[in-house]
Amino acid sequence: MLSVLHTYLCEMQKIGILGGGQLGRMLLQAAANYPVETYILENDEKSPAAHLCHHFVKGDIKNFDDVYRFGKQLNALTIEIENVNIDALMQLEAEGIQIFPKPSVLKIICNKALQKQYYADHKIPTAPYLLTNNREELAGNKDFLPAVHKLAEGGYDGKGVQVINDEADIAEGFDELSVLEKKVNILKEIAMMIAVGVDGKVELYPAVEMVFDPSLNLLAYQLCPAEITEDVYFKAEAIALATIKNFNSPGIFAVEMFVTPEGDVLVNETAPRVHNSGHHTIEAHYSSQFDMLWRIMLKYPLGNTGAIMPSLMQNIIGADGQSGLADYAGFEDMLKIDNAFFHIYGKKQTKPGRKMGHVTIMSNEKADLLHKANKIKHNLSVVAKK
Ligand code: ADP
């Protein structure tokens, strides 16, 4: 018996995650169901994922040696953020360690200029664009306005994105390599998560719809399924599948798209990893995006992407003017709400706009989803401890 157990433990796959934030944390929660030994590489020992892995390794995910040394002891490796040392991942891949997604995909996605080029090369519908190397070149393309200026590298969560409506906005533009993309008349922003197995088998999650708060330019909430016509749905599905096809990589992908008033679908960007727009799948779908990624990495059959019930996902973010040790005012009361599932990420410090958690609400009635989301928005706030 002991030797059987010994063999079992010895044969357990060793899989690592670069980054120890909330995505890593939720990945590890799902890993607990499977025979896998988990590793995290992260600088902050108090990060949300740190205490949930079997082995925490302190190190810099952008440093070649740290990533290489970390990966060398593993069977497979994934990421929770794109901004990692891709050269080290390429080296590890060449030496037989499986990387989800392939480093070649990360290379394309990490750079918005390369990402746009990829869409153009594979005839994926996306907003027309040109590249600018500095603000002068931006000024030289007045005829292309109104447009959206996006830093090629280093932007995230809307940082590194600047709307340039007319000449007066040019001073707000970026002075380094950027994509200047025609401003799209957006009816809806949607996203589709796609799972790709090592055998190339593909499963799609239903589309979600992101609703933005125009005053804060932040995601207000996200609905699943997206309220779009059947025609748009099929178009989005085909475009999302075409987008990931030529990556030729197993893994989990989120394809973010714009739907125009005319019913056109344009790809905005792709994330080659578990993603904010898939958080609702933890409770609202049979196999969550996190469960699915373990299935992919452990070479198990893909899970069921179907929805158990319609859902709304809302981020829980640090309140304005509040910086310091995080406190969750109103939390206990909110836990009384039926079918609302809270995830507090365990970040010690709050600051305005920081993602501190999320809630997924499930209901067959949209009015019920919206009512509960509104209640939570107004009664739960992440403040600094007095
Ligand atoms: P990030 O990578 O930081 O999330 P995005 O490229 O997704 O940045 O842009 C952030 C937001 O800016 C989008 O969700 C959308 O609301 C708006 N946006 C981006 N590109 C365009 C565009 N071409 N036209 C209109 N709005 C856009």
Image: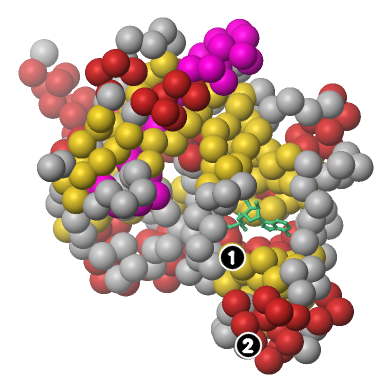
Whether residue 90 appears in this view of the structure is yes
**Stretch of the chain drawn in magenta:** 347-372
Direction left: furthest residue: 2
Q: Is residue 41 above or below residue 7?
A: below
**Which is nearer the eye, 198 or 159?**
159
238 relative position to 13: left or right: right
Task: Work out which quarter of the rendered image holds the C terminus and state it.
Answer: top left
Whether residue 204 appears in this view of the structure is no
Task: Work out which quarter of the rendered image holds the N terminus and state it.
Answer: top left
Disc 2 marks a residue whose amino acid type is Asn
Pointer 2: residues within 10 angstroms few (<14), some, or many (20+)?
Answer: some
Mark 2 = which residue? 134
Q: Is 357 in the magenta?
A: yes
177 relative position to 262: left or right: left
Query: Can you tell me whether the CB of the residue at mark 1 lies under 8 Å from the nearest atom of ligand 1?
Result: yes
Q: Residue at x 29, y 16 (%)?
A: 333
Q: Secondary structure at mark 1?
A: strand
Q: Which mark is residue 161?
A: 1
Q: Position of residue 314 (x, y in %)?
A: 48, 31
Q: Residue at x 8, y 18 (%)?
A: 2
298 relative position to 20: left or right: right
Q: Is 140 in the magenta?
A: no
**Which is nearer the eye, 153 or 124?**
153
The colour scheme is secondary structure
Q: Residue at x 31, y 62 (%)?
A: 61
Q: Residue at x 50, y 55 (%)?
A: 157
Disc 1 marks a residue whose amino acid type is Val
Quadrant hosting residue 42? bottom left
Q: Which mark is residue 327?
A: none
Q: Are marks 1 and 2 in contact (CB under 8 Å)?
A: no
Gap in Å between the C-alphas at discs 1 and 2?
15 Å
Q: Position of residue 369 (x, y in %)?
A: 55, 17
